[in-house]
Amino acid sequence: MSADASTQNSARWYALALFILTGLFMFRVLAQLIQVWRPVAFLPSFEVWQSGALPYPILLMSQVVILWVCLRVVWQMFLGVVVAAPKNGRLLLSLGGLYLLGMGIRLMIGLTASPEHAWFGALLPTIFHFVLATFMLVYGLYHVSGASPSKRIPLEANV
């Protein structure tokens, strides 16, 4: 396998990982929205999805913006137009690491010292914060790894 093909293959795996993480977050947004409009028994109740840190309309709008950013990144990754920028990658890794650490602390406090607290005890929202932190870390790794293709990644190419 040529170096260029290897780089394209590597970039494709980053794109796929980001796509899966975006899909998980989209599931979270849609599941809570379903529980607002037409609750179903097979999903956790609205309250389980909501930590109460933000009123739901504001939370939903911020989630839509986050989804738009994630989908834009994923689309650009699949098109192969994202050029690795190590400085941006280091920033994403730092912020993503702090985000992950903060949510880890939140989870530990929620599971041990303060399970009844609305924010600390909100397990499901915390799990999906891990998803977003992981998105930042994977995207940061892409940038610092130099996996950027020199040309477009054909979507139909064999892996």
Image: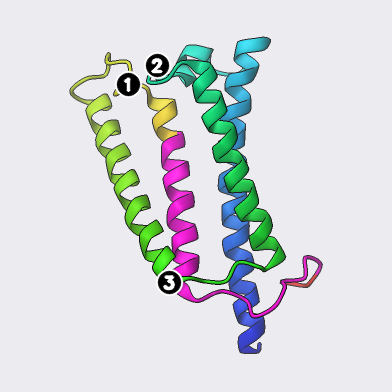
Mark 3 is surrounded, within 10 Å at the Cα level, by few (under 14), some (14 to 19) or many (20 or more) other residues, namely some
Looking at the rendered image, the quarter that the C terminus falls into is bottom right
> Which disc number belongs to residue 119?
1
Residue 142 seen in this snapshot: yes
- Amino acid type for the residue under numbered disc 2: Gly
> Which disc number belongs to residue 52?
2
Task: Give the magenta range.
Answer: 128-156
Q: Residue at x 34, y 45 (%)?
A: 100
What's the CA distance linking mark 2 and mark 1?
7 Å
From the viewer's perspective, tell me whether residue 150 is left or right of residue 101. Answer: right
Residue 125 image offset from top left, x and y in percent: 43, 28
User: Which image quadrant for residue 3?
Assistant: bottom right
Label 1: state its secondary structure: loop
Residue 151 image offset from top left, x and y in percent: 69, 78
Label 3: state its secondary structure: helix
Q: Nearer the viewer, residue 121 or 73?
A: 73
Tell me: residue 159, above or below residue 110.
Answer: below
- Amino acid type for the residue under numbered disc 3: Pro
Sequence order check, earlier mark of 3 and 1: 3
Identify the residue at the far left of this view. Answer: 113
Residue 10 image offset from top left, x and y in percent: 58, 72
Q: Residue at x 44, y 50 (%)?
A: 134
What's the CA distance linking mark 3 and mark 1?
35 Å
Tell me: residue 21, above or below residue 83.
Answer: above
Tell me: residue 122, above or below residue 47.
Answer: below
Identify the residue at the far bottom of this view. Answer: 2
Label 2: state its secondary structure: loop
The residue beneath circle 3 is 86
